[in-house]
Structure formats: structure tokens, C-alpha cells
Amino acid sequence: GGFYWKPLENPPRPRQVWKRSAELESKKVITYEEGGSNGQSGADARSTVALLLVSSPVSSDANVEAYCISMDGESSQLLVSDDVQGAALCRPPTPDASSAYFLPFVVTVQNNYETSQLVLTVEDLTQDSSDGKSLVRGVTLASAILDLTDVSNESFAPPPMSMGSSPEVLVCCNQDFIVAVIRSRGLVFAYDFTTDLMESGGQSTSSGNLSLVGK
């Protein structure tokens, strides 16, 4: 599971913030990150979601899976994709991210096997209305094809990382920018991600747009 350690001047008692389920117990964690905010400040500030990319510990050719886990003590688990090339969490636009509770957006890069194209997608995360705790996938806010038609077909052996050669695509998010790095091709795609919040019938809905700013 995931733990937070108290400051060194306090007894070193770890605080568990999420538990690994039986389904994840046998998986190798490749990457880990946290996102969102519980709206608290100081020592009580916490992320709301953990994103794990996992794979088989014995097979180097196994699919990479993406899971989101709630960090509210319930450790509800959401399988985002059972075959992902890369993923990251993205901060949605909030009036004051330091004091507001929010869930992050999820950015994934997946292979469309019908068209042999890599597709970058930004999705919303919500909580199940029936219990208010379980994570569920929301709407797709925006998507873009990582266009490789105008580049060389030359491929490279991806440099190994601490947990192996996966994931194939590194995804990084900073403010409004989303960057995807295709490791085997040596290519970097940078997008400006914008969102529009619409009010209708007392409910808020979001839509987004991905604009390529660099390649």
C-alpha cells in the first residue's frame, strides 16, 4: 500500500493512506503518482487519488495496466485501462487549488490497434453517486492522435528504467501543458490543454481541447 511518514522529530510511525487490493498484490508497480486535493491545509493536506501503472513481475511482454486508487481511507480501486502505453494525472482548473477539494483528470496514451495509432485522451474522474466514495470514470474531455506519419520510421531501444523498459510512453502534466514522450521513437509531443465549464439545469459539465504546441 501507500504510506506517509511523519516528520523526523515525531515517532517514525507510518500512516497508511491506501491499501493494495488482492488484484494488485501480485503486480509489479512501474510508476506511481498522486493528484487532487482533500481541501485541507498544513499537516492534514492530502492528495485524493493515486495513479499506479503496473505489470506482471515475470513477463517483460505483459500489458501495462493503469489503476486509480482513492486516498480517503476506503482505497476504492478503478481500472482505467488494462493495456495502456502511458498515463498521468492532470490538475483541473480550480478557483483555488490550495483550499478546494477536487479530483484530478486522468491522461492516458493507448494504442488503437484498428488504426495502429497512439491516442492521447483526457478523462474526468468522479465519485459514484450511490456511495460517494468509489471512483468511476467520467466523460472524455479531449483526445488527440500522436501523428507519426511525417517522421522517420527509425526506432530505438528504450533505455531501461528502474522497474524495466515500460511504459512505452512517458506522460507529464504541468499546469495547462501535457507532454507525451514516445521512448522508442525519440519523439516529444507537447499540448496546451484548455477546458470549458458549462452550467445547465444546476449541473456542471466540462469539455476540453488539446492544441499541439510542439513536436
Image (cartoon, grey):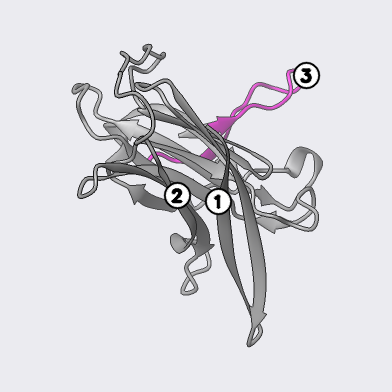
Q: Give left or right: position of 207 versus 135.
A: right
Badge 3 or badge 1: first in the primary sequence: 3
What are the residue bounds of the magenta stretch?
Answer: 3-20
Tell me the kind of residue under disc 3: Glu
Q: Is residue 205 above or below residue 11?
A: below
Residue 144: mark: 2
Q: Of marks 3 and 2, which one's residue comes earlier in the chain?
A: 3
Q: Residue at x 38, y 28 (%)?
A: 151
Where 193 sits versus 202, above or below? above
The residue located at (59%, 67%) in the rendering is 206
The tag earlier along the polypeptide, 2 or 1, is 2
Q: Nearer the viewer, residue 78 or 108?
A: 108
Q: Tell me, yes or no, whether the highlighted magenta stretch contains residue 19.
A: yes
The tag on residue 9 is: 3
Question: Is residue 181 at least partly visible in the picture?
Answer: yes
**In-front residue for pair 167/178:** 178
Contact between labelled residues 1 and 3, with CB atoms less than 8 Å apart? no
Query: Does any portion of residue 22 appear in the rendered image?
Result: no
